[in-house]
Image (cartoon, rainbow, N blue to C red):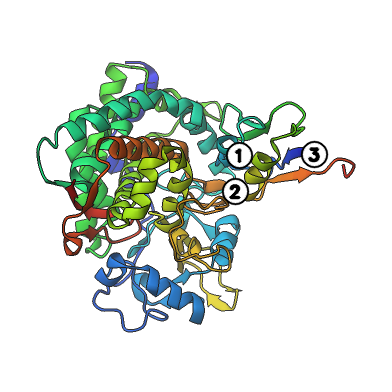
Amino acid sequence: MTAADDRFIRDHREDRTDRPVGTRSEVVTGPVSDWATDFSHVEPEWAADPYPIQNDLRQRCPIARTERFGGGWLPTRYEDVAAIAYDTERFSSRSIIMSNFRPPRELAPVGGSPPISSDPPFHHDARKLLLPAFTKNAVTRQEPATRALCHSLIDAFGEQAVVEAASDYAQHIPMRVIADMLGFPPEDGPQFRTFVENTLEGVNLPPEERGARIAPLFDYLVAQVHDHLDNPREDLTTYLINAELYGRKLDPSHVVGTLVLLLIAGIDTTWSAIGSSLWHLAKTPADRRRLVAEPGLLPTAMEEFLRAYAPVTMARLVKEDMRWHGVDMKADDWILLSFPAANRDPAQFDRAGEVVIDREINRHAAFGLGIHRCIGSHLARMELRVALEVWLQRIPEFSLADPSAVTWAPGQIRGPRTLPLRIG
Amino acid sequence: MKVHIDSERCQGHGRCYDLAPGLFGADDEGYSKVLGDGTVPPGSEHEARLAVLNCPEHAIEVVEDGLT
């Protein structure tokens, strides 16, 4: 072992107990009384169809309030969402999942999963380490394997008349791609699903239970780091272990935190984008037929699916008490930063509530705006394009087998989790 | 007619090099760069305008000749 490996000898859980503790708020669940004053993005009504709620709030608020999660705000206009995304002076990314736990202020500017959880100036440097691996050019290397995987998933459908497109197709694509990039065993995919659910969902569980559910993810990643220390290879994990910032190797919590980000952030999100697009095409035969007939339209249509069904909502924490766009924000209030709501603002988009697959001008914010633009956006676009291309080539005729059986993930990442499609 | 990128605003979404690959490229970190001196050849005006109008960060401008 080299000296640098000492970074990973201590138990990471001991590291975590050294830290300031953060604050917890009372868990409040149950039906929402008024979305303008009591919103909750984890209630079933929101998961099933958040757009009418967002449209209503945009007209009458437009920044909704909740006392749940210890207090927070939900802007619904594009203009407000953009202003917050750009304003890293007044809004911190030190937690980007709105829950009943606020990490301590001392965690800024690094945050738990750099660079998504980082604020300037550290953010820039942590992000710069990752950018070269996620350029459009770099992710092109994953395309042949992605295409082959999509074909093999469809081959595995066999003669079934009804297939489960969320769990037997969409889900597997980002899992396999990120496992390949990180150098994790492809057969570990099913574990990733549990990690994702435990990280992104269950935000209203008691904090101890939530912590206990997340622990196996850290154990898994630390085991992967050790495996890569013993067997270095050409992948992102080895790259991060060896990467340097400010003349030193990265802090072990930075390495593991970034691995958490890379493993979790690309899976649920892309899975959701693929699933929502297939759901739309299954229930909209005219759009499906047109894309089958005009495959060259797919890149344009894909941007429209990303606009209309943007899977990702982020969160911010207000840094200091202030009056902001007509509301009194307090330090440590949450901001639920809804790119989906921004993307359906009629002040920004014509026919905002419709899906227009040949929309040529589409300045949507599905991958965020400003310095935290999704670093995986080129990878996500490649996966979404290949997933839809292969599906439409192989299965040009399909429809919803049972519209009432479709289920949607609750929380900040929204997409179909059950999607039975009838083939033919 | 020339295209111009405000590199302070560009965040590397890559819409311009997706939509107008004859006019824009990516650097090693995925940020956009203008190819050549940014002159839009005849026939590429539509591509140039698509790049401008699809940039989520409003980072691209078309500068008409004589206005620079």
Q: Is residue A98 left or right of residue A128?
A: left
Tell me the residue that label 3 is attached to. Answer: B1
Residue placed under numbered mark 1 in the picture:
B16
Q: How many marks?
A: 3
Residue A413: quadrant of the picture:
bottom left
SS for dot 2 = helix
Q: Tell me which label, 2 or 3, sits earlier in the chain.
A: 3
Q: Secondary structure at mark 1?
A: helix
Q: Is residue A210 left or right of residue A105?
A: left
Q: Nearer the viewer, mark 3 or mark 1?
A: 3
Chain letter of disc 3 in the image:
B
Residue A273 pos. (x, y %)? 35, 48
**Residue A303 in the image, given as x and y percentages of width and height:** 47, 48
Front residue of this view, candidates A421 and A150 = A421
Q: Residue at x 38, y 41 (%)?
A: A293
Read off the residue under disc 2: B54
Instruction: Give the quadrant of residue A128.
Output: top right
Which amino acid, by three-letter code, is at mark 3?
A: Met
Identify which amino acid the numbered label 1 is placed on. Answer: Cys
Q: Nearer the viewer, residue A75 or A335?
A: A75
